[in-house]
Amino acid sequence: MTRLLRGLHHAAKWVGAHPLVRRGRQLELMHRATGFATMTLVTLAPLLIVVAAADPLRRGGFAAWLADGMGLSGRSARVITRIITPPRAVVDATSVWGGVALGIFGVALGGGVQNGYERVWDLPPGPWHRVWRQATWLVVLTAYLYQEEQTREAVGGLPRMAMFLATGLVFFWWSQYFLLGGQVRGRRLLPGAIATAVGLMGLRGFSWLVFQPLIVDNAVSYGAVGTVLVIESWLIGVGFVVFGGALLGRWLSEDHPHKTEQG
């Protein structure tokens, strides 16, 4: 393991990525990704469960959203559906104040993502009255996830992959620009959006190869707890890609071109 880490360190220096590694340590990337996963599971998932249950077009439910996001199908998707599907009366049982509370908790996730982007670009924390940006981001995020699930059966194969990359690029470019309040120029944020979209596509393939059989095995061995642990691991991967993609984008737009000119 020591030799592997040393080899990765030398490889990073060879390609000029040492500043990227240093910034990742300063950002505490893995710790931030773990916090993102926990916050998503605790604050965003309950809100999405209600929204998915209220879907007027097709009541696939939150489990279908999650299975599609992880790239699951067949038995593994059925395992998630069986464990996560909420009661049929979930919308009727949710009061107006309950819905407002879910929205407020969901906004906390937007605050965490905004703070991560601010750290990536070395910007001061935004003022408290910018919470409306986080609320707006939450609404757009929900719409983004909704359209991704709705196009699952309408579009497949390579067109679906192209659509996944295109919508992801637009959403994460807009997310950075909007949450940072326009403090960073849009063209400087584009590499990070591309890196995030491509990273999520790669994570989707990894999930299909690794998490899909793992979910079935864990469901047999550990029950619902094992399935939730796999989902949490996937969410950590999502958080790593979201913040790591933005970090890589800054390096590509700043440090890497500078080094190329020197060479």
Image (cartoon, rainbow, N blue to C red):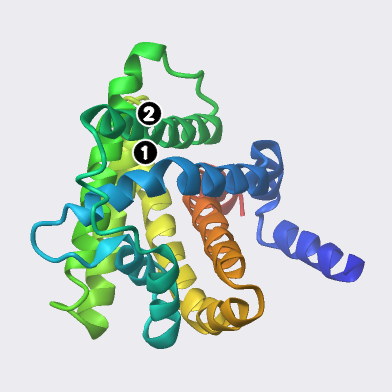
Q: Is residue 141 left or right of residue 118?
A: left
| Looking at the image, residue 259 lies above or below residue 86 | above
Residue projecting furthest to the right? 2
Secondary structure of the residue carrying tag 1 is: helix
Q: Provide the residue designation for mark 2.
A: 180
Question: In percent of the image, x 40 and y 73: which residue is there?
Answer: 82
Q: Residue 212: horizontal and vertical position, in percent?
A: 50, 80
Q: Residue 197: horizontal and vertical position, in percent?
A: 38, 60
Question: In percent of the image, x 61 and y 77: which residue is there?
Answer: 218
Q: Provide the residue designation for mark 1.
A: 176
Secondary structure of the residue carrying tag 2 is: loop
Residue 209 in sight in this render: yes
Residue 84 appears in which quarter of the rendering? bottom left
Type of amino acid under label 1: Gln
Question: In percent of the image, x 19 and y 45: which residue is there?
Answer: 92
Q: Is residue 164 left or right of residue 212?
A: left
Residue projecting furthest to the left? 57
Residue 258 in sight in this render: no
Where is the C terminus found, in terms of image quarters? Answer: bottom right
Q: Residue 19: horizontal and vertical position, in percent?
A: 67, 45
Q: Residue 244: horizontal and vertical position, in percent?
A: 54, 51
Q: Nearer the viewer, residue 223 or 173?
A: 223
* Label 1 close to label 2 by CB (< 8 Å): yes
Residue 61 appears in which quarter of the rendering? bottom left
Q: Nearer the viewer, residue 76 or 147?
A: 76
